Amino acid sequence: MASAFLANRDGTQVRKHNVDHAFKRLLEHVGIARRDDGRRTPCLHALRHTAAVHRLTSWYRDGADVQRLLPALSTYLGHADLDGTSVYLSMTPELLHEASACFDRYVNGGHHA
């Protein structure tokens, strides 16, 4: 029997519906709601996107071997391969900056111009 990533006190798997409901109640409690400008209310799925992009940005910033670490990110997100993970990796200004700096170091032989 596989163990659950999120478990109740009795060890049973937490149901997605319960997690979504708790997150919705939390948003209501702190006063976060959809605004008139049409922006959507935050959701747990969006947090996965944010976490993936922040992890990738941090790896670039730390000078890590991103290509070697991408399979670990896929595993962490529960994907069987990088294709599943790629949809989570939106380009942000911070990620573009860090990736560009990495490329610049590569082109200039490890020296930042």
Image (cartoon, rainbow, N blue to C red):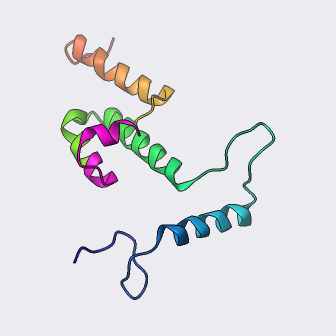
The image shows residue 108, relative to residue 11, as above or below, that is above
**Residue 48, percent from left and from top:** 45, 49
> Which residue is located at x 35 percent, y 21 percent?
101
Quadrant of the snapshot with the N terminus: bottom left
**79 to 82, vertically: above or below:** below
The total of numbered circles placed on residues is 0
**Which residue is situated farthest in the right direction here?**
36
101 to 45, vertically: above or below? above
Residue 4 quadrant: bottom left
Asked whether 100 falls inside the magenta stretch, the response is: no
The residue segment tinted magenta is 73-88
At 43% from the left and 41% from the top, the residue drawn is 54
- Residue at position x 74%, y 53% in the image: 33
Quadrant in which the C terminus is drawn? top left
Image coordinates of residue 62 in percent, x first then y, are 31, 37
| Left or right relative to 93: residue 40 | right
* x and y percentages locating residue 16 in the rendered image: 48, 67
Does residue 81 belong to the magenta stretch? yes
| Viewer-nearest residue: 58 or 25 | 25
Front residue of this view, candidates 28 and 103: 28
User: Main structural element of the magenta stretch: helix, strand or loop?
Assistant: helix
Query: In the image, 23: left or right of 94?
Result: right
| Side (left or right) of 24 relative to 46 | right
Q: In which quarter of the image is residue 8?
A: bottom left
Q: Which residue is drawn at 37% across and 43% down?
A: 55
Residue 105: x and y in percent read 27, 18
